[in-house]
Image (cartoon, rainbow, N blue to C red):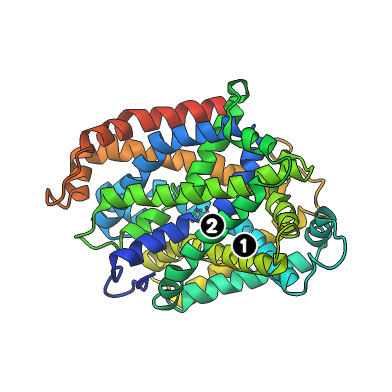
């Protein structure tokens, strides 16, 4: 990932690959590997996947392009970007920044679980004797101290990278590690779909049962599209602000969601068939990744080696996302309040850590406390941020581009002032003005009703 240092002279991505990797790095993360499979499992499998695709096409691509355009046009953080175009619109960016902050608080709790699983794979916890993967996982996340320690470690890692500047290292490693993750997912998927009894899971995941498509499923899919593509949070606006004026935005807006969806589908195909083959239930929830895949590794030759490699890659993918989450609020505070970058990152990192503690405890001793819709603390924060704040922020983004700033202005920026062709521009204009906002609104209202 190229220079994200932004203080005096605003840097730009060093190369096309740098930007694509950074944006794809932000998009591909726990949302794909952890959240997508379990949300699909809880929401009817194929029905969810179908709705996910519909929303991806109508809303995902559309908003990806919209955010990149606003970011590059204004060269500012999310709040500043809206405000530069229209004085009293900064609050839309504000919703996003706040959501990114809330998401980071539980994201780093899950990131901490991943670190613990890296260690478990080194110490052979999965392979020694007959381990019950469910018990192994539950006894870890429900203990009060350990997960918080790992949450702290994950937060520190995120902080360290954001503070130290993101140049050099991550960009270099991403070029190797992202493709490795892809290859690895294919291997695991192949093992999973060939387990005896896997076909039921494949059908569950790929064959939509239309009667399962409810308002709730649609809202879950909407939230997942936003979460997975890092939309509605100002992250893509911020990343777009570092994009060179010569870059082809329409092309990038296509590639990033494509890569992201590819990885999510692979994760679904790696996990859900195994759920059925191994006699688990698909609506296991957030535990799914951590229980099913170790069980699959146990069925593979060199299982403990694959487990280690896999959880290391998941950790890397999670970090390239968490740094973008933190970057969104850090760049906002640095730009708006003129605080130092290091100071800001430390302060925000500390608040994120504190905010994550109840999420961590909600998996154990605070497990009985429910907040929204009978959800525990972690799931409630996720619900508010992903299923309410992000869609709202996305809705206002559509209104902003379609009706306030104007599609013509946006297309002017997207085509580098007519220097590159964007044949779908009129279609995109129609999507962002009408289709996307109406779709978001309908799903949102139906889902909440
Ligand atoms: N898109 C990331 C994932 O799927 O894991 C999570 C994420 C990163 C969400 C950055 C939002 C964001 F701004």
Above or below, 377 relative to 446:
below
The residue that label 1 is drawn on is: 108
Sequence order check, earlier mark of 1 and 2: 2
x, y percentage for residue 2? 35, 71
Quick check: 389 above or below 169? Answer: above
Does residue 328 appear to the left or right of 204 in the view shown?
left
Give the residue at x 27% y 30%. 430
Instruction: Tell me where residue 371 sits by quadrant.
Output: top right
Q: Is mark 2 within 8 Å of ligand 1?
A: yes
Q: Is residue 283 visible?
A: yes
Residue 149: x and y in percent read 72, 71
From the viewer's side, name the closer residue of 173 and 148: 173
Q: Residue at x 47, y 64 (%)?
A: 178
Query: SS for tag 1?
Result: helix
Residue in view at x 45 percent, y 32 percent: 54
Q: Secondary structure at mark 2?
A: loop
Is residue 67 visible from the viewing direction of this image? Answer: no
Quarter of the rendering occupied by the N terminus: bottom left
**Mark carried by residue 29:** 2
């Amino acid at each position: 990932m190229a220079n994200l240092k932004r203080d005096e002279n605003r840097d730009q991505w060093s190369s096309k690959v740098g930007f694509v990797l950074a944006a794809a790095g932000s998009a591909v993360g726990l949302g794909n590997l952890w959240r997508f499979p379990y949300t699909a499992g809880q929401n009817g499998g194929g029905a969810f996947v179908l709705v996910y695709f519909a929303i991806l096409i109508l809303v995902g691509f559309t908003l990806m392009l919209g955010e990149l355009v606003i970011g590059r046009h204004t060269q500012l953080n999310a709040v500043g970007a809206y405000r530069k175009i229209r004085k009293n619109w900064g609050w839309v960016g504000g919703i996003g920044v706040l959501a990114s902050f809330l998401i980071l608080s539980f994201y780093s709790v899950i990131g901490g679980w991943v670190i613990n699983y890296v260690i478990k794979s080194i110490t052979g916890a999965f392979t020694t004797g007959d381990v019950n993967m469910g018990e192994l996982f539950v006894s870890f996340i429900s203990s009060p101290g350990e997960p918080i320690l790992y949450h702290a470690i994950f937060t520190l890692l995120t902080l360290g990278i954001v503070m130290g500047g993101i140049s050099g290292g991550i960009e270099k490693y991403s070029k190797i590690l992202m493709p490795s993750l892809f290859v690895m997912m294919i291997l695991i998927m192949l093992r999973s779909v060939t387990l005896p009894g896997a076909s039921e899971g494949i059908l569950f995941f790929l064959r939509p049962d239309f009667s399962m498509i409810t308002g709730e499923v649609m809202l879950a899919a909407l939230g997942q599209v936003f979460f997975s593509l890092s939309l509605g949070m100002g992250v893509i606006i911020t990343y777009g602000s570092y994009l060179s004026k010569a870059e082809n935005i329409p092309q990038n807006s296509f590639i990033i969601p494509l890569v992201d969806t590819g990885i999510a589908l692979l994760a679904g195909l790696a996990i859900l068939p195994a759920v059925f083959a191994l006699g688990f239930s698909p609506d296991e929830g957030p535990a799914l990744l951590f229980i099913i895949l170790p069980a699959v590794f146990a069925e593979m030759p060199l299982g403990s080696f694959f487990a280690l490699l896999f959880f290391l890659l998941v950790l890397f993918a999670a970090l390239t996302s968490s740094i973008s989450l933190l970057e969104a609020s850090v760049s906002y505070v640095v730009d708006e309040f003129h605080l130092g970058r290091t100071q800001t990152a430390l302060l925000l990192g500390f608040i994120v850590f504190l905010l994550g503690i109840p999420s961590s405890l909600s998996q154990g001793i605070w497990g009985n406390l429910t907040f929204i819709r009978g959800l525990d603390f972690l799931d409630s924060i996720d619900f508010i941020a992903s299923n309410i704040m992000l869609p709202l922020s996305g809705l206002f983004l559509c209104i902003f581009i379609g009706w306030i700033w104007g599609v013509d202005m946006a297309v002017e920026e997207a085509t580098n002032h007519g220097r590159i062709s964007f044949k779908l521009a009129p279609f995109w204009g129609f999507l962002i003005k009408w289709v996307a906002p109406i779709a978001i609104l309908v799903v949102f209202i139906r889902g909440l009703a």
